[in-house]
Image (cartoon, rainbow, N blue to C red):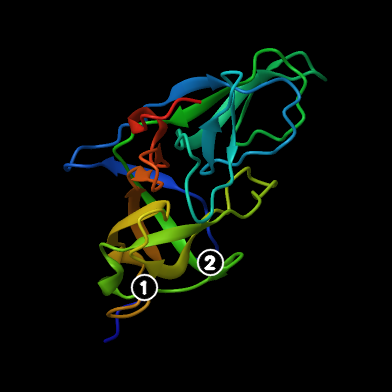
Amino acid sequence: MDMAYPTVDAPYGLVPVGLIGGRSYTGATRQMKIASNYGTAIGKGDLVKRVNDGTIERDGSTNALPATGTLGVFMGCQYTDPNTSQLTFNNQYPGSIVASDIHAFVADDPDLIMKVAICSSGTTMATLARTVIGNKTGILSNTLNTTNGASKLAANNSVATTSTLPLHIIDVVDTTATGSDTFQELLVIFSTHTDNGSNVFIGGHAYRNPVGI
């Protein structure tokens, strides 16, 4: 009898599932401020980055992480709704919220292991073979699902050994495979920072990047 495999219908962003070294991810996040009226929406599972004024913004990296590094995965936010004056918790930051107390919850551990769906372009699902483990991949930084606030970020099905690519593949997800060697999801970590050729280190996770903002 053939085994029935679960289907992954669409990308869902980055989902923290563990930490390097077999350690558990227990849901820990750090609160980080978003500037009032920041105009770009951020979905649960998107990446975020630090900017000069000390606030955070959506990190739309595709083929390389920001020069000063990424901060981690956006897991939701809270703010005083300017229309109701009520404290509001939201999976997404909708964009253009005028409030002085917008705080994102960010999974910021540099050792995060994250699950991510594979797409060929946009939100078109794709598969890869187990041989991709150890390679690097880029990000398809799709706009979030505004209905449920979830990210649509995905891993690109084009893999390489290029050091600057943002995600390092450490495993495939067996439970959603569509066959014996066709996998719909990956386990990834942040790629380490790299030398840009001028003895300047760029990319990687911000906490381990020697470059300041």
Q: Is residue 184 visible?
A: no
Vertical comparison of 18 with 11: above or below: above
Q: Are marks 2 and 1 in contact (CB under 8 Å)?
A: no
Q: Amino acid at mark 1?
A: Tyr
Q: Position of residue 195 (x, y in %)?
A: 36, 45
SS label for mark 1: loop
Disc ID at residue 51: none
Q: Position of residue 204 (x, y in %)?
A: 38, 41
Q: 130 or 197, which is in the foreground?
A: 197
Q: Quadrant of residue 165?
A: bottom left
Q: Amino acid at mark 2?
A: Asp
Please tell me how crowded label 2 is: few (under 14), some (14-19), or many (20+) other residues with Cα within 10 Å: few
Write down the residue under mark 1: 5
Q: Position of residue 152 (x, y in %)?
A: 58, 54
Residue at image x 30%, y 69%?
132
Q: 189 or 106, which is in the foreground?
A: 189
Q: Position of residue 128 (x, y in %)?
A: 37, 74
Please tell me how crowded label 1 is: few (under 14), some (14-19), or many (20+) other residues with Cα within 10 Å: few
Q: 16 or 191, which is in the foreground?
A: 191
Residue at image x 63%, y 42%?
149
Vertical comparison of 131 with 107: above or below: below
Q: 120 or 91, which is in the foreground?
A: 120
Residue at image x 62%, y 55%?
142
Disc ID at residue 9: 2
